[in-house]
Image (spheres, rainbow, N blue to C red):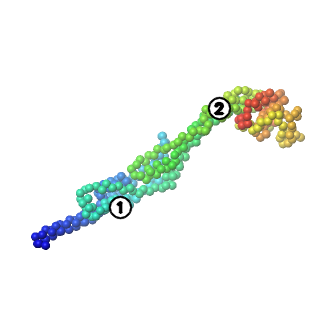
Amino acid sequence: MPRKYLIPLITVGVFLLVLVGGAYAYDSATSQTIESGVTVGGVNVGGLNADEARAKLHQNLLASLEVPVTVTRGSESWQLGPSESKVGVDIDGSVNAALSKGNSGNFITRAIRKISGSSADATVVPTVTYSAPAARRFTDRVTRAIDRPAKDASLTFTVSAVAPVASKPGVAVNRRALRSAVATALATPGISHRVPVTVRVLKPKVTTGQLAQKYPVLITVDRSNFRLTLFKNLKPVKTYPIAVGRAGLETPAGLYSIQDKQVNPSWHVPNSAWAGALAGKTIPPGPADPIKARWMGIAGGAGIHGTSEDSSLGSAASHGCVRMSIPDVIDLYDRVSVGTPVFIA
């Protein structure tokens, strides 16, 4: 090769060696500096060295994650603090990942990219940890505080009236959605730590308007005033004079229902001392049978039946049953059915 070409080639070669060496030296000198445009969990760490990036992530990223998670419903709120959730972030791993974002390509392209000030525009998703059992206990506590079963409409009884108790809807927390939202708030930097509760409304099975359908017929027994009242659609329609149990053999108080019905029943005499020689026997229909015309059993051997002793009506004279005149018991028998509620005051 002629000498006149050799010298320029040597000059170019030397220049390239210097350029490559300079690029290598610059790349090495900046290898512990995160490239511009790199973010960790939304925190810009571009241009920082490892120590600076760690300090910034501690101040900005970890601090944002340690804000308590607040679950809200209306004016009520519940908090899960960092001491309970044990939330944390792998800062060292995040810094190493951020540094590696600038290590793509060879040292020449890296040097050119750094010198030109071009941005890497890279995002590092940090590894966030928290106590899953603590988060679960928290959501369970919120759920217990909010959940309320639906309340069916019901009745309150007095000796002369039946009063409806209104139904109430219930609420139930969407537990799965709440757990997911709390987990997302704990593990995702930069998002709101306020979590609204999603609930569904629970409808009662029996509404106030359905009570009359559920209780089309019912009976109340006023032991003090010796009256039996028949209700239809929760309204009194007829009152009958009665006799009730004497002292020591009182007609049992409480809410019962008609268990069985019989026409011209036999008397199955209770095995009790008051029955004397008749105890345990069965007396067939006829003059010796005190249970006349009709029987409506209610509880523990007690029932509503007819009597031929009309003079006992208006007094405490029976052995625990409710006595009615024969015409009245026949009339009542045809108006009620098995299952009809009987409230004895």
- Label 1 residue SS: helix
User: Horizontally, is 254 left or right of 180 in the view?
Assistant: right
Q: Quadrant of residue 293?
A: top right
Residue drawn 58% across the image and 42% down it:
149
- Can you say whether 279 is above or below 99 in the image? above
User: Horizontally, is 195 left or right of 290 in the view?
Assistant: left
Residue 165: x and y, percent?
62, 34
Residue 53 or 239: which is nearer the viewer? 239
Q: Are marks 2 and 1 in contact (CB under 8 Å)?
A: no
Q: Label 1, on which residue?
A: 96
The label on residue 212 is 2
- Label 2 residue SS: helix
Quadrant holding the C terminus: top right
Q: Identify residue type, mark 1.
A: Asn
Residue 104 or 86: which is nearer the viewer? 104
Q: Is residue 224 visible?
A: no
User: Horizontally, is 77 left or right of 2 in the view?
Assistant: right
Residue drawn 39% across the image and 56% down it:
126
